[in-house]
Image: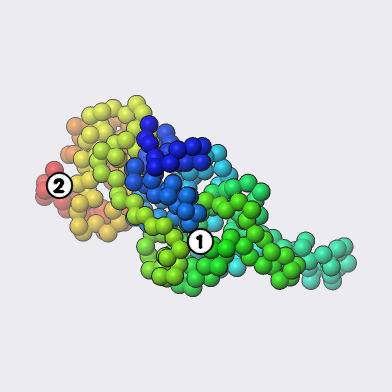
């Protein structure tokens, strides 16, 4: 079993379902000890989102996921005041319209703060939002509280949540926001770690098949002209497709069957086919 910098029930040691480097395990524990958000970057398929799921499962804590979109606003993560519903109720004689609290709904961040027990909060793909979004969360993430003017109520976390923030590096995040985070970049797994990842999902995969698949996968990723390189999820799907189809192992290098499982762009498939026709891939 992997060891960590910290001992005890509240430390993260990885899990049987998530393969993490010792460096990543250590930085998770450092962020929890310092009570700072952990900002995780890395290309798609490096397990950024699954890390939060693994931490929650390993520590026995509830996971709250705030999936960020281009239209997401920081206010929506705190709370929403449904003024339209209140107006509707007042027009049609709804009872209790003077109780504004009835029309306040906590967002994902507000839900994490209001929880009586510590939770794991995943702010997923923060770089999808506009540039001001991270800055709009500075006070709340620092103080772990926010005020609701409509009810004159302050929501303050009694137990600071474990905050994991992911980014695909689509845009730069503000310096003021970065200063408040612990940062870690997850490198794409090497062949040894990838073999371990595949075996977590398919423990009985045939050794020779896996060796051929990994060699082909990393050769394809090395082709500079491929725009969207296959990631871990595509590799796992490819392994399963090959196993289910019963394609002979010796045909993998010759035919590269089911390339549409690995590559999702017409241009990338055309690039791969040119390399195969020239015989310069293997």
Q: Nearer the viewer, residue 132 or 59?
A: 59
- Secondary element type, mark 2: loop
Residue 262 in view, yes or no: no
In the rendering, at what x and y percent does residue 238 appear? 32, 40
> Residue 281 — which label?
2
Q: Which numbered disc, 1 or 2, marks the residue that appears first in the sequence?
A: 1
Is residue 181 shown above or below 234? below
Q: Quadrant of residue 103?
A: bottom right
For this view, does 176 lie left or right of residue 268? right
Residue at which label 1 appears: 68
Q: Nearer the viewer, residue 260 or 204?
A: 204
Q: Quadrant of the N terminus?
A: top left
In the rendering, at what x and y percent does residue 64 appear? 57, 50
The residue lying at 19 percent from left, 32 percent from top is: 250
Q: Quadrant of residue 22?
A: top left
Residue at the extreme bottom of the image, as rendered: 132
The residue lying at 20 percent from left, 40 percent from top is: 215
> Residue 134 — which label?
none
Is residue 80 shown above or below 122? below
The residue lying at 19 percent from left, 53 percent from top is: 223
């Amino acid at each position: 079993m992997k060891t960590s910098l910290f001992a005890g029930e509240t430390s993260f040691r990885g899990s049987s379902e998530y393969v993490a480097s010792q460096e990543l395990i250590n930085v998770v524990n450092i962020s929890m000890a310092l009570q700072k958000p952990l900002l995780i970057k890395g290309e798609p398929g490096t397990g950024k989102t699954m890390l939060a799921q693994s931490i929650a499962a390993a520590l026995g804590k509830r996971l709250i996921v705030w999936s960020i979109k281009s239209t997401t606003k920081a206010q929506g993560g705190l709370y929403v005041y449904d003024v339209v519903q209140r107006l509707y109720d007042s027009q049609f004689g709804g009872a209790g319209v003077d109780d504004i609290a009835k029309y306040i709904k906590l967002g994902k961040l507000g839900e994490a703060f209001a929880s009586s027990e510590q939770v794991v909060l995943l702010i997923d793909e923060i770089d999808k939002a506009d540039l001001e979004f991270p800055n709009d969360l500075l006070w709340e993430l620092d103080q772990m509280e926010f005020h609701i003017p409509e009810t004159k109520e302050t929501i303050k976390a009694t137990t600071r949540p474990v905050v994991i923030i992911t980014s695909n590096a689509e845009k730069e995040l503000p310096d003021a926001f970065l200063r408040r985070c612990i940062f870690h970049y997850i490198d794409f797994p090497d062949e040894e770690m990838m073999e371990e990842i595949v075996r977590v999902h398919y423990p009985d995969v045939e050794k020779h098949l896996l060796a051929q698949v990994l060699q082909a996968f990393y050769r394809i990723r090395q082709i500079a002209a491929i725009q969207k390189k296959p990631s871990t999820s595509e590799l796992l799907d490819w392994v399963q497709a090959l196993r289910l189809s019963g394609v002979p192992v010796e045909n993998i290098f010759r035919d590269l069957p089911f390339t549409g499982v690995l590559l999702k762009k017409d241009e990338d498939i055309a690039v791969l086919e040119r390399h195969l026709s020239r015989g310069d891939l293997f």
